[in-house]
Image: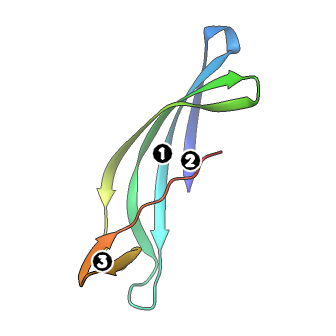
C-alpha cells in the first residue's frame, strides 16, 4: 500500500520528485495478516520520448516485521529471501 504522496515539479515539468510512504502486508497459512515492511520512497521521475520513467529511487525501510515466511526459498539446504521490484 502506497500512501501520502507528495509531488514536486522539477525542471519546468520535465521531471518530478515524489515522496511517499509504503506498507507491505502479508498473511500465510503460518502467519496472520500483519505488516512486514514499512517505510518511505523518495523517487525522481523524468519525462522521455516514451513517457515517464524512474530516474532515481530511494527506499528507506523504517519497520521490518516477521519476514520468516516471506518469499523464502531454499537452495542447497539454505534459505534466502527474495524481493522483487516492478518496473512501470
Q: Mark 1 points at which residue?
A: 21
Mark 1 or mark 3, which has the lower sequence index?
1
Residue lying at 62% horizontally and 19% vertically, measured from the top left: 15
The residue that mark 3 highlights is: 68
* Residue in the image at 67% along x and 8% along y: 12
The residues bearing labels 3 and 2 have C-alpha atoms spaced at a distance of: 25 Å
Label 2 close to label 1 by CB (< 8 Å): yes
Q: Farthest residue toward the left? A: 78
Q: Considering depth in this image, is 82 or 64 the residue closer to the camera?
A: 82
Name the image quarter holding residue 9: top right
Nearer-N-terminus badge (2/1): 2
Q: How far apart are marks 2 and 1 (CA)?
A: 5 Å
Residue at the image point whose x is 48% and y is 59% from the top:
84
Q: Position of residue 36 (x, y in %)?
A: 38, 66
> Mark 1 packing: few (<14 Cα in 10 Å), some, or many (20+)?
some
Q: Where is residue 35 in the image (x, y as percent from the top left)?
A: 41, 67
Left of 79 or right of it: where is 45? right
- What residue sits 47% from the left and 74% below the top? 26
Q: Quadrant of residue 53?
A: top right
Q: What's the distance in space between the residues labelled 1 and 3, CA to CA? A: 23 Å
Which SS class for mark 1?
A: strand
Tag 2 residue = 3
Indicate left or right for 72 with 46 as reference: left
Ranked by sequence position, the earlier of labels 3 and 2 is: 2
Amino acid at each position: 500500500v502506497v500512501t501520502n504522496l507528495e509531488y514536486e515539479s522539477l525542471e519546468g515539468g520535465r521531471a518530478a520528485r515524489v515522496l511517499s510512504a509504503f506498507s507491505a502486508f502479508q498473511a500465510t497459512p503460518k502467519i496472520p495478516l500483519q505488516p512486514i515492511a514499512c517505510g518511505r520512497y523518495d523517487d525522481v521521475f523524468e519525462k522521455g520520448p516514451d513517457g515517464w520513467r524512474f530516474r532515481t529511487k530511494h527506499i528507506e525501510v523504517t519497520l521490518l516485521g516477521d519476514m520468516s515466511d516471506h518469499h523464502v526459498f531454499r537452495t542447497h539446504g539454505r534459505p534466502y529471501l527474495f524481493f522483487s521490484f516492478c518496473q512501470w
